[in-house]
Image: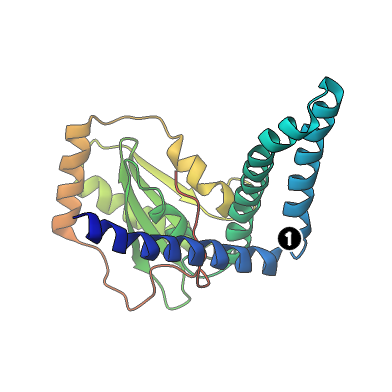
């Protein structure tokens, strides 16, 4: 057992390094200054720690203590910027909304592209404690698709709240970068038992099986999970 765990450790570290490297590459393609930014945050944080040490008469000790704090500050800065860059990199791409919705693991199950047209307008269906959320991506024609899917949802799950969301930057729409937070903040209307029952009903109905990738993201991009 001990040897087996020891063998797994290098693999785990390798995967983590690859994930970080891929995230950095994607972030750099969107925000070329990220390297200088990370170094700047690290240097400033460490310099503040050393300055405090000089003030209290313990520069070496405070410099040693503030070093991991500086690393954490730099990593926190990178995480925030990388999350923003991930949204920028997928914004405007086909199925971007599905990628964001499917990244919400806690309490939500999303079926991508339950309705789609040849113009690549599409509707995704998510089910959670808030009810049934229908998310549309594409042109104004999506609004008619949303109405059709609402009628289907109300037929299969009468009495369950149905929320329509249109992805976009126009008035009344939800920007892709705010979609995850918007859905996660919807008020809970169903009990856990009711939610499972609704999911079971739609699982029996199924969704469209389309030969499209699960997300439009470039290799290595991970949409932040909520």
Q: Which of the 4 quarters of the picture holds residue 68?
A: top right
Q: Which of the 4 quarters of the picture holds residue 123?
A: bottom left
The location of residue 108, given as percent across then percent down, is 33, 45
Residues 171 and 77: in front is: 77
Q: How is the image coloured?
A: rainbow
The C terminus, quarter of image: top left
The location of residue 151, given as percent across then percent down, is 29, 51
Q: Residue drawn at (47%, 61%), measured in percent from left and top?
A: 142
Q: Residue drawn at (46%, 66%), measured in percent from left and top?
A: 95
The correct choice, above or below, for 41 with respect to 56 in the image is: below
Residues 43 and 137: in front is: 43
The correct choice, above or below, for 97 with respect to 201 in the image is: below
Q: Residue drawn at (48%, 58%), measured in percent from left and top?
A: 97
The location of residue 127, given as percent across then percent down, is 30, 46
Q: Which of the 4 quarters of the picture holds residue 118?
A: bottom left
Q: Residues within 10 Å of mark 1 (few under 14, many from 20)?
A: few
- Whether residue 207 sits left or right of residue 226 in the image: it is left
* Residue occupying the far top of the picture: 56
- Whether residue 42 sits left or right of residue 102 in the image: it is right
Task: Check disc 1 and report the residue beneath it.
Answer: 35
The correct choice, above or below, for 65 with respect to 119 in the image is: above
Is residue 175 at all visible to an observer of this figure? no
Residues 91 and 56: in front is: 56
The correct choice, above or below, for 123 with respect to 106 in the image is: below
The location of residue 186, given as percent across then percent down, is 43, 34
The N terminus, quarter of image: bottom left
Q: How many marks?
A: 1
Q: Secondary structure at mark 1?
A: helix
Q: Residue drawn at (82%, 20%), measured in percent from left and top?
A: 56
Is residue 25 at all visible to an observer of this figure? yes
């Amino acid at each position: 057992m001990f040897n087996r765990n020891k063998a797994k450790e290098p693999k785990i570290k390798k995967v983590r390094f690859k994930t970080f490297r891929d995230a950095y590459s994607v972030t750099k393609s969107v925000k070329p200054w990220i390297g200088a930014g990370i170094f700047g945050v690290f240097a400033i944080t460490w310099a503040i720690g050393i300055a405090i040490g000089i003030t209290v008469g313990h520069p070496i000790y405070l410099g040693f203590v503030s070093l991991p704090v500086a690393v954490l500050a730099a990593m926190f800065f990178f995480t925030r910027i990388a999350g923003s860059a991930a949204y920028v990199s997928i914004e405007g791409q086909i199925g971007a909304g599905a990628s964001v919705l499917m990244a919400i693991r806690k309490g939500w199950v999303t079926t991508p592209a339950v309705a789609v047209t040849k113009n690549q307008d599409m509707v995704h269906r998510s089910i959670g404690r808030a009810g049934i959320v229908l998310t549309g991506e594409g042109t104004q024609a999506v609004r008619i698709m949303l109405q059709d899917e609402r009628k289907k949802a109300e037929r299969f799950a009468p009495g369950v709240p149905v929320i329509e969301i249109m992805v976009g930057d126009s008035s009344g729409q939800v920007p892709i970068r705010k979609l995850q937070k918007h859905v996660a903040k919807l008020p809970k209307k169903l009990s856990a038992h009711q939610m499972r029952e609704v999911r079971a009903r739609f699982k029996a109905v199924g969704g469209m099986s389309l030969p499209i990738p699960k997300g439009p993201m470039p290799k290595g991009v991970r949409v932040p999970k909520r």
